[in-house]
Amino acid sequence: MTAVQLPRRRALRVPVAWRRPAAIAGSVVLLAWVLVALLDPLLGLQDPLQQSVGDAFRAPSAAHPFGTDALGRDVLSRTLWGVRSSLPLAVALVAGSLVVGSVLGAVAGYLGGAVDEVIMRIADLVFAFPTIILAMVVAAALGPSLLNAVVALLVVSWPNYARVMRSLVLGARGQEYVVAGRLLGAGPFTSLRRDVLPNVSAPMLVLAMLDFGNQILLLAGLSFLGLGAVPPTPEWGSMVADGVTQFSSWWLATFPGLAIFSVVVAFNLIGDSLRDALDPRTAGAVQGSSI
Amino acid sequence: MSGLDIRGLTLELGGRRILDGVDVEVPAGQVTGLAGESGSGKTMTGLAVIGLAPAGAKVSGTVAYDDGEVRVPDLLALRPGAMNRLRGRRIAMVFQDPTASLQPMLSVGTQLTDHMRHHLHLSRSAARTRAAELLERVRVPSPEAALKRYPHQFSGGQLQRIAFAIAIACEPKVLIADEPTTALDVTVQAGVLRLLRELTDDLGLAVLLVTHDLGVMSAVADTVAVMRNGSVVEHGSRFQIITDPQTAYAKELVESLPHTPPPGTGEGEA
């Protein structure tokens, strides 16, 4: 490990932590999906939109490795094309709600008082409705499109992050090192950024990674109701939603489901490694022994 | 007078009077001890002086600050922004438990240079050079390597030395040390106290040393103020307080020391 004895800044340490098997596995899977998304037109697949009613509900075969759906479309092609809409949308959705929720939650927890009350009561308002119902209302008001579905889900999912963030910040801001930071002249926002946030990022990261699968399925739920992906567009969530009603054609839900599963697992593996890499206490193997 | 002058410092929290007119002078170049039992308001005095009393506390009285360059008639009347510029720059603080007061996610180098770059506008490399000098000054072994390490990789005594280095980095004139040795074992304690004394003499610091441990007081303090129930009951030279306490409470506190008082005081010799 002599080569990694001199990490100077955290930014340089992440690649080292990337050498963990879990991180490699997660990155490879994710990278593979990104490549698939970029190279879809070059893969020589069937047109994912091409219908062939005579070939409906064909079981997996040499011509259709993943079978065909109710309209005779190739499931393999649709699954591989589906990554183009599902992956970026899920990433945008999770990243968006992580950022919005974290910022609001952190501000509420750190400043307290009236600011806290206002933010958390709005969060309570969102919590008061069932997630999918409220998302439907927002999506319906905005009109059916994938982008609007993302916005609708953002509106209903930020409070989860805000709640967790707020309680983490409440715990962390009482720590002595936060007070010590203030005593060195750090103002409230410097203190929040420098001393509080790094110490609460790990659980937030885990929460976000676990949320991926959830969000893809919620997105699918909206698509299923006609408020998300507009029908011919291949999208994993709506493919699963279509497939679960066809018990005899198991391949309809299974393959897009496996795709979702692989992405969720990949993000979780990456999230775990990222958390370890960001915390100097668990990045131990990288840092050399203690004095 | 150069240093801190605390007059009639009163602090109310939730209808309870925690500090009830504290008067203490903390002159430059001296260690002023603040002794007293738990709950007597020692720590609260330190926090109130630096403007970090808990939310909802009502603070009154005056704290005059003077270091020859900057004079502030009353720290308590400063706006938050102005107070922020003094914190870490002119007035610094060292806490009881260094494992809690250092940020676990930042390297020692970052924690030691951030405030220098902010307050003194040093470049990254200049701050880094000075940080290494500071670590050498407080006798942390191999300073260059130590800058790259994280708090969990040091022992308690070394961490407290680092905390002192952070505190004196911007050449403050006043240092508030809140039980700086309580979390350390006795041999390490002696080293840290020697360091505190040295820094006081060399840098002309006005040190307010908060501790319940009269043993620590007798080792480094020039004068000792004894606090009880939120006010100072007796303030005198270290020698006078330890050997000839005037008030009943100070007497009790001195008598509670585990070791035998110096001979000739007539106490504990029966």
Image (spheres, coloured by chain):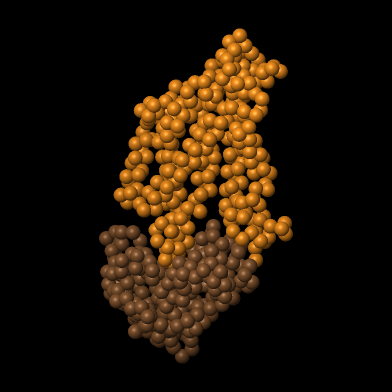
Confirm whether residue A180 shows in the render: yes
On screen, residue A245 above or below B159: above
Confirm whether residue B98 shows in the render: no
For the point 43% across and 59% down, which residue is it?
A190
On screen, residue A69 above or below B3: above
For the point 60% across and 50% down, which residue is it?
A276
On screen, residue A69 above or below B124: above
Residue B140 as seen in the image, left or right of residue A149 = right
Quarter of the image holding residue A61?
top right
Residue at the front extreme, as displayed: A42
Report the chain shown in brown.
B
The total number of labels drawn is: 0
On screen, residue B128 above or below A19: below
Quarter of the image holding residue A60?
top right
**Residue A227 at x, y percent in the picture:** 43, 25
Quarter of the image holding residue B58?
bottom left
**Residue B147 at x, y percent in the picture:** 59, 67
Residue at the bottom extreme, as displayed: B264
For the point 37% across and 49% down, which residue is it?
A108
Residue at the top extreme, as displayed: A54
Between residue A216 and residue B174, name the one nearer to us: A216
**Residue B164 at x, y percent in the picture:** 51, 72
What is the drawing colour of chain A?
A: orange
On-image quarter of the N terminus of chain B = bottom left
Between residue A279 and residue B264, name the one nearer to us: A279
Between residue B50 and residue B66, name the one nearer to us: B66
Between residue A131 and residue B258, name the one nearer to us: A131
For the point 62% across and 23% down, which residue is it?
A77
**Residue B261 at x, y percent in the picture:** 47, 84
